[in-house]
Image (cartoon, helix red, strand yellow):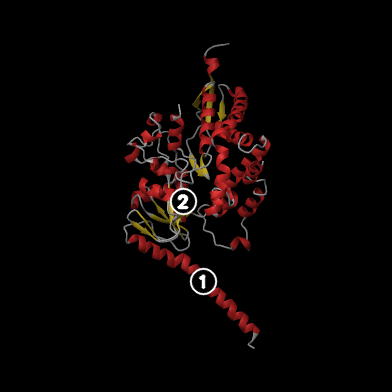
Amino acid sequence: MGDPILILSSFVCLCLLLVLFRFLHRFWWTPVYIQYRLGSQGIKGPSYKFIHGNTKEMLKMRNEALSKPLGLLDDIFPRVLPHVYTWMNNYGKNHLSWRGGEPQLLITEPELIKEVLYNRDGSYLKASLPFYSMKLMGNGLATSEGEQWVKHRKLINPTFQGENLGKMIPGMIVSVELMLQSWKKYQAKEIEVSEEFRLLTSDIISRTAFGSNYLEGKTIFDMMTKYSNIIRRNIFKPRFPGLSKIWKTSDEIEGDKLLGVNSVMEIIKKREEKISMIINEALRLYPPTVAFIRRSEREVRLGKFILPANIQLFISNLVVHRDPGIWGDDAHLFKPERFSGGVAKATSNNVAAYFPFGIGPRTCVGFNFATVGAKIVLIMILQRYRFTFSPTYVHSPVINFLLVPQHGIQVILHSLQSDEGPS
């Protein structure tokens, strides 16, 4: 029998070599191979940097974009996705970039987008979410695949359709009425409405979709807001699998504490167990989610391209919704009349030209709930108030898990009743 110490040391050396091999394969060989394969097909992009990919460049461009003022009529694309905007101009509408060792291919042609998101042959799976996003979402409807996703979808889908959706409308009206009552003290004064709408959203969802009370919903949405800040801080930081089991950052510790609060999925489980033009145009210019990421499960043909397995496909509705070839030279301007004949006419029946909530089988399950709620809120507000931007308002959309105003939305409320004289 050999020397135990020699055997142990040999085993440790073998393990270290295996780890080194896997590390080099992921962060060196795979990027070199994929850049060569796609480059030979005419797909270019910024050069891969060892370990970090292009994340340092992305972070630098984002910080520079956020430091610059933005006019109210300026296009938000260069501010919200500055790296995509820059690299589209440099390398074309289809280009390859790197989030650490993960390759991301931007695709913008509606026909290719439709092929990926409809996913009729099962070749395109949802890409794994970043570490913090995955901890927030869990393994529910938004992240699961296969039979588990089908089960979740069948279970949840009826909640937001037909008769069930109609039953939620009275709860929506109550929530909006309470908010408008609280606005009386702000007449002819400045009010920060983005926070008001955030609280309204939590109240509506708490009263309707989840059947819980306002305070429970507020606690959950406060947690999600704080956790979204953690996601934003870490989105461009590369992660090494298994490291968090040994050592946790301060953000990981804080995130674990926040997720100790009852999660949204737990509230859903409790339930399971028992104009339009203005809105369409607003969702075109300011979609809540600005990107959908899929992953090629195997080598596939997408249009004229042959893609290796495990390529992330980056699909941004923010890009497509601002394409002058689809929407005209004034694509970045707010013009609700585009939708006067409905979405189909506005897009010439191209379903991949307008998709604020996605398209295909994984379209957001709450799409109808969100649009019905938005119509009710807008109608009830406009019946009582008109408003103008406050001089303190700064136009500053930013991605914070969702597309949100970085500094809030300050407006001056004007009561329509007071405009008509004393009653």
Helix, strand, or loop for circle 1?
helix
Above or below, 6 against 256 in this view is below
Whether residue 129 is visible to the viewer of this picture, yes or no, is: no
Mark 2, residues whose alpha carbon is within 10 Å: few (<14), some, or many (≥20)?
many
- The spot of residue 253 in percent (x, y) is 64, 54
Q: In this view, does 151 lie to the left or right of 44?
A: right
Is label 2 or label 1 in front? Answer: 2
Q: Distance between the residues labelled 2 and 1?
A: 29 Å
Mark 1, residues whose alpha carbon is within 10 Å: few (<14), some, or many (≥20)?
few
Q: Between disc 2 and disc 1, whose residue precedes?
A: 1
Whether residue 107 is visible to the viewer of this picture, yes or no, is: yes
Quadrant of res 13: bottom right
- Residue farthest toward the bottom in the current orientation of the protein: 1
Which residue does the numbered mark 2 point to in the structure image? 293
- The spot of residue 114 in percent (x, y) is 40, 47
Helix, strand, or loop for circle 2?
strand
Which residue does the numbered mark 1 point to in the structure image? 20
Above or below, 193 against 117 in this view is above
Q: Residue at x 34, y 37 (%)?
A: 348
The answer to whether the residues at label 2 and label 1 have Cβ atoms under 8 Å apart is no
Q: Which mark is residue 43?
A: none
Pick the quarter of the image with the N terminus.
bottom right
Going by the numbered disc 2, the residue's amino acid type is: Ile
Q: Which residue is drawn at 60% across and 37% down?
A: 209
Pick the quarter of the image with the C terminus.
top right
Going by the numbered disc 1, the residue's amino acid type is: Leu
- The spot of residue 83 in percent (x, y) is 42, 50
Q: In this view, does 164 lie to the left or right of 284?
A: right
Quadrant of res 320: top left
Q: Which residue is drawn at 53% across and 75% down?
A: 17
- The spot of residue 134 in percent (x, y) is 57, 52
Q: What is the count of numbered marks?
A: 2
